[in-house]
Amino acid sequence: MRKKAPGGKPAKRPAGRVTAGSRPKLRARSAGAASKPKSAAKPKRKFLPIPGRAREILARLEREYPDAHCALDFRGPYQLLVATILSAQCTDVRVNLVTPAFFARFPTAQDLALADPAEVEILIRSTGFFRNKTKSLLGMARGVVETYQGEIPRDMASLRVLPGVGRKTANVVLGNAFGINEGVVVDTHVTRVAGRLGLTKHTDAEKIEQDLIPLFPQAKWTMVSHYLISHGRQVCIARRPRCEVCVLADLCPSARLFL
């Protein structure tokens, strides 16, 4: 028991004295035990600046997918415009199953402009969102007939005023039906692959397009989309990209995350 100093206060311990209760605990270490070596940090991967990397990406994809093309079956701009509207939230394979019967019944924009909405809905039901798509198709056809005398227009501004036609749809038609490279088509595959390759940090389609346009020659804009889409379908798939067989792995900042 500690003695009390005069006045009732506990006496101070002598300086330097260590009691059993105040002795610091020491971690036991076996004699001669060596400390674990620190794991060596992985060297950071270095990449070409984005413009140079984009040129190399394009060159490799051209060699890898020499037969890349629009996956929608069509004959002429009218059919491609219809098929592209139908492809929203739907696979190209499904659209290609639906369009032969559709075009047999409505071979021209004039025929479609006079169509019964209920009949159109029945023909396109399996593509999903068939009521909204029916409104877009009929509105597009009537606009083409009334404003452009039944001919699909060949410029971005004229196409975009048609119901159901956004920039992506207009780019598809201009690039594949008319051979006009107005822009880069950005779908889910292009969004995913371009993001993983570090060519864009955006998720909005029009902002992604504006990032891609200056990186590639204008004459290649339509094909850039086909190359990126082909790569996204075959190698850079959404859930588990096949980085081990990817021709772009050494150019891709995301590859290390999946290898």
Image (cartoon, grey):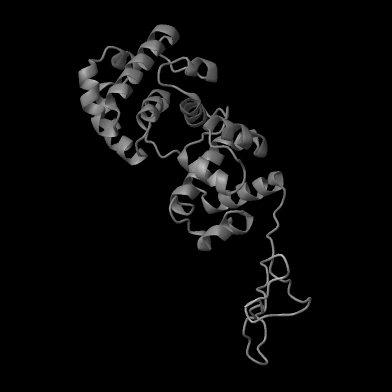
Residue at 32% x, 36% y is: 96
Name the residue at the front extreme: 6
Q: Is residue 143 left or right of residue 205?
A: left
| Residue 246 seen in the figure | no
Name the residue at the bottom extreme: 31
Residue 26: x and y in percent read 65, 81
Residue 68: x and y in percent read 48, 45
Q: Number of callouts in the render?
A: 0
Residue 117: x and y in percent read 24, 17
| Residue 110 location, quadrant | top left
| Residue 254 location, quadrant | bottom right
Residue at 70% x, 44% y is: 51
Q: Which of these two is toward me, 61 or 151? A: 61
Q: Which of these two is toward me, 14 or 49? A: 14
Q: Is residue 127 left or right of residue 53?
A: left
Q: Is residue 75 left or right of residue 198?
A: left
Residue at 51% x, 35% y is: 186
Name the residue at the right extreme: 15
| Residue 83 seen in the figure | yes
User: Would you place residue 131 above or below residue 145 in this image?
Assistant: below
Quarter of the image that includes the N terminus: bottom right
User: Would you place residue 35 above or below residue 197 in this image?
Assistant: below
User: Would you place residue 193 above or below residue 165 in this image?
Assistant: below
Residue 16: x and y in percent read 78, 78
Residue at 33% x, 41% y is: 93
